[in-house]
Image (tube, grey):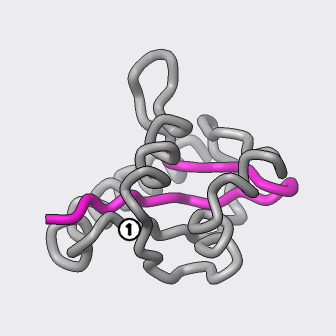
Amino acid sequence: MRKKIILIGLLLLFVSIFFSGCFFQENSILVRKTNAIPDRYVNISEQQIEQLPHLKEAILANNSIIKTPGDEFNKIYDLLMGDDNILAEYIKYHDEYYSIILGWGD
């Protein structure tokens, strides 16, 4: 199980590097629902999601790139950045887990 989580993490890292360089021309987010329970994730409350409408849109769209304004993108980044300065790659919202990839625009 641990090897599977590590492989998924490495795959997500590769995909995020690929997408950030090739597809993201503006700040964007990509969210995908996952059945795996990650070791590290950020809980997102209803109050938080209402303040982040593009994140909510990305969760509902599942697997779509959503262009995100700079101020909201920065809030999402800050939310994902842990106290240990390691960016979380997963979120939990309504008892469901999602991988999240941030794409910085050129």
What is the span of residues highlighted in magenta in the rendered image? Answer: 89-106
Q: Is residue 45 above or below residue 32?
A: above
Q: Main secondary structure of the magenta part?
A: strand
In the figure, residue 84 lies in which quadrant? top left
Q: Is residue 67 above or below residue 85?
A: below
In the figure, residue 26 lies in which quadrant? bottom left
Image location of residue 105, percent across then percent down: 22, 64
Mark 1 surroundings: few (<14), some (14-19) or many (≥20) residues within 10 A: many
Q: Is residue 63 above or below residue 35?
A: below
Mark 1: amino acid: Ser
Point 16% across, 76% down: residue:
22
Magenta span includes 16: no
Residue 106 falls left or right of residue 63: left
Image location of residue 93, percent across then percent down: 77, 54
- Give the number of callouts: 1
- Element type at mark 1: strand
Query: In front here: 30 or 47?
Result: 47
Point 59% across, 73% down: residue:
58
Point 62% across, 79% down: residue:
62
The quarter in which the C terminus is drawn is bottom left
Image location of residue 52, percent across then percent down: 63, 57
Residue tagged 1: 28
Image location of residue 68, percent across then percent down: 43, 67
Residue 23 falls left or right of residue 81: left
Magenta span includes 91: yes
Query: In front here: 48 or 84?
Result: 48
Q: Is residue 12 above or below residue 64?
A: above
Point 21% across, 75% down: residue:
25
Residue 35 falls left or right of residue 41: right
